[in-house]
Image (cartoon, grey):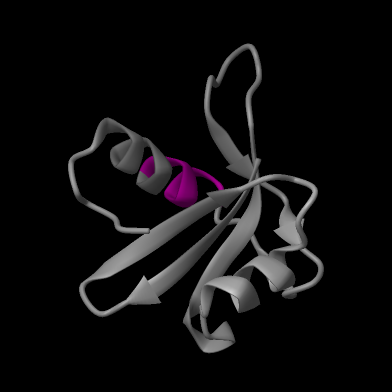
Amino acid sequence: MKYIIANWPGTEAVYLFETTIMHAHFARSQGIPRDRIVAAGFVGDSADAPLRCHGQSTSLGVTSRGEVDTEILRRRLKGDGASGG
């Protein structure tokens, strides 16, 4: 999966989508303004981390914030409302 995190008033929303879609195309299709995007990359897993954000988006020129993004995604998947998207 790929992801984008956008900064909206009061929250950072995470968006997940298929790896076949370019980050920039996804952002444009969802109406996410470029100046709101604070991180982007890939969601993968490894033996020591079942969920991990990493990498970068070349089409947006934005990198992953690693553990910061991973924690936002974990909270969202748990459904605590800490992030939107």
Instruction: Name which quarter of the figure residue 74 lies in.
Output: top left
Quarter of the image for the N terminus: give it.
Answer: top right
Q: Is residue 48 above or below residue 62?
A: above
Frontmost residue, 82 versus 19: 19
On the image, the x and y values in percent for residue 40 come to 62, 60
Q: Residue at x 54, y 49 (%)?
A: 16
> Which region is colored magenta?
66-71
How many circles with numbers are drawn on the protein?
0
Give the overall secondary structure of the magenta segment.
helix
Residue 45, position in %: x, y? Answer: 63, 24
Residue 67 lies in the magenta-colored region: yes
Image position, residue 49 (x, y; %): 55, 21
Q: Position of residue 66 (x, y in %)?
A: 56, 47
Vertical order, 57 against 28 (above or below): above
The reply, left or right, for residue 32 in relation to residue 21 is left
Which residue sits furthest top? 47
Query: In the rendered view, does 58 fall on the left or right side of 71?
Result: right
Q: Is residue 43 magenta?
A: no
Taking the spot 52% from the left edge, 80% from the top edge, the residue there is 31
Q: Which corner quadrant of the image does residue 58 belong to? A: bottom right
In front here: 19 or 7? 19
